[in-house]
Amino acid sequence: ENAKAEFMFARANIVLEFEETLTKDQRSNQEWFPNWLQVLVPTMSEEENGEGDAWQGKMRALRKTMTDVKTKLGSDIDALKIKFLESESKREEAEKRLEEHLKQAATLKEEERVESNRKHELLAQKSDRLEQMLTLVCNHLGDLENTHKEEDAEATTSMTSTTSAKKIPRALKKSRK
C-alpha cells in the first residue's frame, strides 16, 4: 500500500511540474482544465471488502506509534529535566565554593594587612628606640669628649705650672752661675 501511495504521489508531482511549464493562456483553456469536483464514494462496505480490519489495524499501529513516541519524548524530557537540575545543583555548589574561597581570600588579605600594620608599628617603635639610643650614645660621647677636654686642659695647666716651676729653678741656676 505504501508503494502504491508513493507512486500516486510521484505521478501527481509530475502533473504539477508539467502544469508549471504551461503559459497563462494554456492554463485558462477550459478544454484542458475544466472545472470539476471529485467525490470519493466507497464501492463496497469496509466489512464486505475485508479492509475494515486492515484499516483498524493500521489505526491501532499508528496510535501505538504515537503513544510510543509520546512516551519516549516524555522520558527524554524527564531525563533533560534531571540533567538540568543536576547541572543547576552543581552550579550552585560551585558558586558556594567560590564564595567561600573569596571570603577566605578576603580574610587572609585582612590578616596580612593587620600583620603588615603590626610589623610597621614594631619597626617604627624599634626605629624610635634606636634613635633614642643613638641620641644617648651621642650625648655620652659628647660628655666623654668634654671630660677629656677638661682632663686635657687640667693636664696642660698642671704641665704649664710644672714647667714654669722647672723654668724658675733653671733660671735661678743660670743666674747663680
Image (cartoon, rainbow, N blue to C red):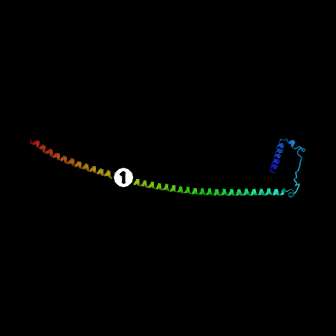
Expressed as whole percent of the image width and height from the top left, the position of residue 124 reads: 40, 53
Quarter of the image with the C terminus is top left
Q: Kindly identify the residue that appears in the image at 43 percent across and 54 percent down.
A: 119
Q: Which picture quadrant has residue 31?
A: top right
Left or right of 166 on screen, residue 23: right
Q: Kindly identify the residue that appears in the image at 45 percent across and 55 percent down.
A: 115
Left or right of 86 on screen, residue 45: right
Q: Kindly identify the residue that appears in the image at 23 percent across and 49 percent down.
A: 151
User: In this figure, which residue is indicated by the disc labeled 1?
Assistant: 130
Q: Secondary structure at mark 1?
A: helix
Q: Kindly identify the residue that appears in the image at 28 percent across and 50 percent down.
A: 144
Q: Is residue 133 above or below residue 175?
A: below
Q: Is residue 83 above or below residue 165?
A: below
Expressed as whole percent of the image width and height from the top left, the position of residue 60 reads: 78, 58
Expressed as whole percent of the image width and height from the top left, the position of residue 63 reads: 77, 57
- Foreground residue, 87 or 73? 73
- Foreground residue, 96 or 167? 96
Q: Which picture quadrant has residue 46?
A: bottom right
- Foreground residue, 67 or 174? 67
Q: Amino acid at mark 1?
A: Leu
